[in-house]
Image (spheres, rainbow, N blue to C red):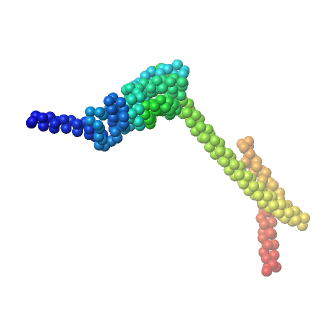
Amino acid sequence: MGWFAGALVILALVVLFNAIKLVPQGREFTVERFGKYTRTLKPGLSFLTPFVEGIGRRMNMMEQVLDIPQQEVITKDNAMVKVDAIVFIQVMDAAAAAYRVDNLIYAIQQLSQTNLRTVVGSMELDEVLSQRDIINSHLLQAIDAATEPWGVKVNRIEIKDLTPPADITDAMARQMKAERERRAVITEADGEKSAAIARAEGAKQSAILQAEGRKEAAFRDAEARERAAEAEAKATAMVSEAIAKGDVNAINYFVAQKYVDAFAQLANSPQQKTVIVPAEMGSLVGALAGVGELVRTAQSQQQDSRPGKR
């Protein structure tokens, strides 16, 4: 009887172990009854019918990252590029993912590779290298639509690496260098243009200021000449008045002034090497004496006129 009781205990433990199932968070288990799917167990503690029901598939319901192996793809313009990608998927329906496709991960990888070849092959090399976002968007739409019946949601797909052939890489490097040199030349030309404009503007302002200076100088010269002419006119008028009155000193003053001016011009001439002084200086001295007498006469007249004004 002892062995029978022990067998019963062992049997009870086996039944209890098969009947009670603990599902961890982020997982879902499918339940099969005699090999047929019946239901899905959610995270937590669940009970099964012993010897009738059993666990079919243990599905990972968390987001997963799949690596798409590198492959060579021919673009629309017959350029060979190497491309690989990564896919972010999440199982939404455990039963569909378990029973509608065999080897879910392998199926998604192959599907991603074929769609990657299709999308990249329909574009030219320059578009492939510059429009990764468009490639990612097209791949996401195509793969998500294809995996929807499997109960899988494709959240993102990203091109990880694009490697063009070596000769194309060298050509791109030369093109980039040429473009940078062109931009440098344009920048330098713009700088020289700005400098030339600034110099021209400075020359213009300088010319304007110089013209204004010459204008002001000419105005002042004209004003000085006008004043000198007025003074000479007044002096000539006084001499003429004195001559009209019969004053000999006025005549002597007028003749002496013209004589002195002519002698000064003769001495200052750049072509004149020798100056001949007249031998008869008596007339000049007399003229100068007449000038002195005329000046004294004018002073005495001014002094006589001042008391009358007072």
Q: Nearer the viewer, residue 221 or 155?
A: 155
Task: Examine the rendered structure and indicate whether residue 245 appears above or below residue 280.
Answer: below
| Residue at x 54% of width, y 33% of height | 184
Q: Nearer the viewer, residue 149 or 141?
A: 149
Decide if residue 250 is in sight here.
Answer: no
Q: Quadrant of the C terminus?
A: bottom right
Answer left or right for 197 relative to 143: right
Answer left or right for 286 relative to 66: right
Task: Please state the horizontal and vertical placement of residue 39, each as a whole percent of the image.
Answer: 36, 36
Q: Nearer the viewer, residue 1 or 263?
A: 1
| Count of labels in the image | 0
| Residue at x 38% of width, y 26% of height | 102
Task: Please state the horizontal and vertical placement of residue 131, each as a whole percent of the image.
Answer: 52, 31
Task: Please state the horizontal and vertical placement of residue 61, each as a whole percent of the image.
Answer: 37, 37
Q: Residue furthest left?
A: 2
Task: Examine the rendered structure and indicate whether residue 64 appears above or below residue 292.
Answer: above
Task: Please state the horizontal and vertical placement of residue 25, each as a whole percent of the image.
Answer: 32, 41
Task: Examine the rendered structure and indicate whether residue 139 appears above or below residue 77.
Answer: below
Answer left or right for 52 relative to 137: left
